Amino acid sequence: MGDWNILLETTDDGNIIATVLEVSNLQISETTKQGEVAKVKQLLRERLAKAEIVKVSLVDESSKSENPLMKFAGIFQDDADFADIILEIQMEREVD
């Protein structure tokens, strides 16, 4: 499962708390960073051996609709006045 992000925090008493950011409830405390990383790797392997990731969508495919803004696409396509406005805007941008 690729790379994981581990947050290593040193406490006031010198211990180090390691938290796997992608699995927030996977957290351990050790006295050395090397010990932390090794333990986290082992815990991840054990946990992932009994787990699977399933992607779900809350949007029903049949209820998906077209982008509501698409109804406005091309409404000025044959409008000569709009074409003139666009031309003026382009000319002003070139001057600035």
Image (spheres, grey):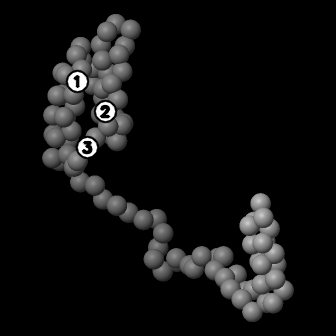
Q: Is residue 8 left or right of residue 52?
A: right
Q: Position of residue 83 (x, y in %)?
A: 77, 84
- Which badge, 2 or 1, is on the more N-terminal residue? 2
Type of amino acid under label 2: Ile
The foreground one among 13 and 59 is 13
- Which badge, 3 or 1, is on the more N-terminal residue? 3
Say which residue label 1 marks.
36
Residue at point 19% right, 34% down?
41
Q: Secondary structure at mark 3?
A: loop
Q: Is residue 12 above or below residue 24?
A: above
Q: Quadrant of the C terminus?
A: bottom right
Q: Position of residue 55 (x, y in %)?
A: 34, 61
Say which residue label 3 marks.
3
Furthest residue in direction right, as rendered:
81
- For the residues labelled 2 and 1, the Cα–Cα distance comes to 10 Å
The foreground one among 78 and 24 is 78
Q: Is residue 78 left or right of residue 32?
A: right
Q: Is residue 84 above or below residue 23?
A: below
Type of amino acid under label 3: Asp
Type of amino acid under label 1: Glu
Say which residue label 2 marks.
6
Q: Secondary structure at mark 1?
A: helix
Residue at point 70% right, 81% down?
72
For the residues bearing labels 3 and 1, Cβ distance under 8 angstroms: no
For the residues bearing labels 2 and 1, Cβ distance under 8 angstroms: yes
Q: Is residue 7 left or right of residue 79?
A: left
